[in-house]
Amino acid sequence: MRPRTPVPIRCSAPPTLTTSRASPTTRVARAAALLAAAAVLLAGGPSFAAAERLLVGSAVSLREPVLAIAARFEVSDPAELDVTFGASSVIAAQIRAGAPIDLLISADEAIVDALDAAERLEPGGRARVAHNRLVVMANADRELALRRPEDLLRPEVRRIAVPEHAVPIGRYAREWLSRRGLLAQLAPRIIPTEHARATLAAVDLGHADAAIVYATDARVARSARVAFEIPPAEQPRIAYAAAIVAGTRQGAAARRFLRFLAGPVAGEILRAAGFSVPAAAPSAAPGAAQP
């Protein structure tokens, strides 16, 4: 893994995203360096078009499977992929501010809908790629008896990690708490986090007693335990959508990667990571290649 030297990017969206270089050897790089290099396009500098280098902005909850999918895609496709991770809402803000992201993978279809309505996406260039669900986690060092939603009201549960409403996991969690009639009572205990993985880190490291996270993120927890799963009937509809950004100079490569994301090879990788996928992504035969 080879880090890149950070260079400031001239972009009005302040948050910094974490970027990884996806290739058969999967090198992790810094977002500032990649976005700064890509910003040369906006300044009229050298174009990446000849090399078909694609910049993908992905929800951080998809980190492991998206890196695996990108690496598999590069095996049989001439395009090179760089992937930047963060909260879907932050990546959408970067796109609105002019960051040269070619394709977005959002943890909330509403964010994609809003970009589409603002004419920031290519017409017809989107696909639903995965679904997720919520669980409640507890810090491993706290002896908390959390077995049902109302247990979050126990006085020993002093801090609950949940992102702001603008972040997909924050919206899903807060809407679930609201439907259960718990949000108002728990609001003073909620500590806001940046995104899904920051929420997991908060409960893992003991900065929070409990957290509401994606079930797939719970699989990569270091020490925090799943206290209880939210019943299926109460689960919010969590759908991940991929979309091609309007004005991309890598339209052909973006369309190929979008088809790959919605195909059987990507579907198998997502299932292995704990996601469910739309029926349109059937299982791939062992060892099968996908164009």
Image (cartoon, rainbow, N blue to C red):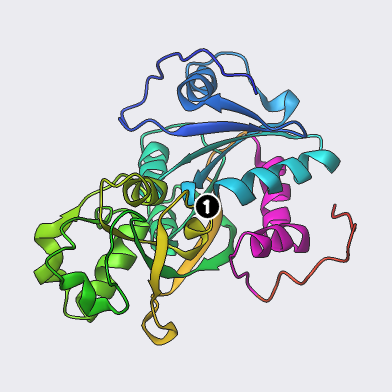
In the rendered view of the protein, which quadrant contains the N terminus? Answer: top right
Horizontal arrangement in the rendering, residue 216 relative to residue 145 (left or right): right
Q: Position of residue 222 (x, y in %)?
A: 47, 48
Residue at image point 33% right, 56% down? 139
Residue at image point 22% right, 49% down? 192
Residue at image point 28% right, 74% down? 176
Horizontal arrangement in the rendering, residue 41 relative to residue 169 (left or right): right
Quarter of the rendering containing residue 264: bottom right
Residue placed furthest toward the bottom: 233
Front in this rendered view, residue 120 or 239: 239
Horizontal arrangement in the rendering, residue 144 relative to residue 31 (left or right): left
Q: In this view, does 184 lie above or below 218?
A: below
Predominant secondary structure, magenta span: helix
Quarter of the rendering containing residue 137: bottom left
Q: Does the magenta stretch include residue 257?
A: yes
Q: In this view, does 5 lie above or below 276?
A: above
Q: Hey, what amino acid is under mark 1?
A: Val
Front in this rendered view, residue 178 or 105: 178
Front in this rendered view, residue 143 or 172: 143
Quarter of the rendering containing residue 189: bottom left
Q: Is residue 170 magenta?
A: no
Q: Position of residue 152 (x, y in %)?
A: 21, 70
Q: Where is residue 153 in the image (x, y as percent from the top left)?
A: 15, 72
Front in this rendered view, residue 110 or 135: 135
Horizontal arrangement in the rendering, residue 46 relative to residue 76 (left or right): left
Q: What stretch is highlighted in magenta?
A: 250-278
Q: Name the residue under label 1.
A: 220
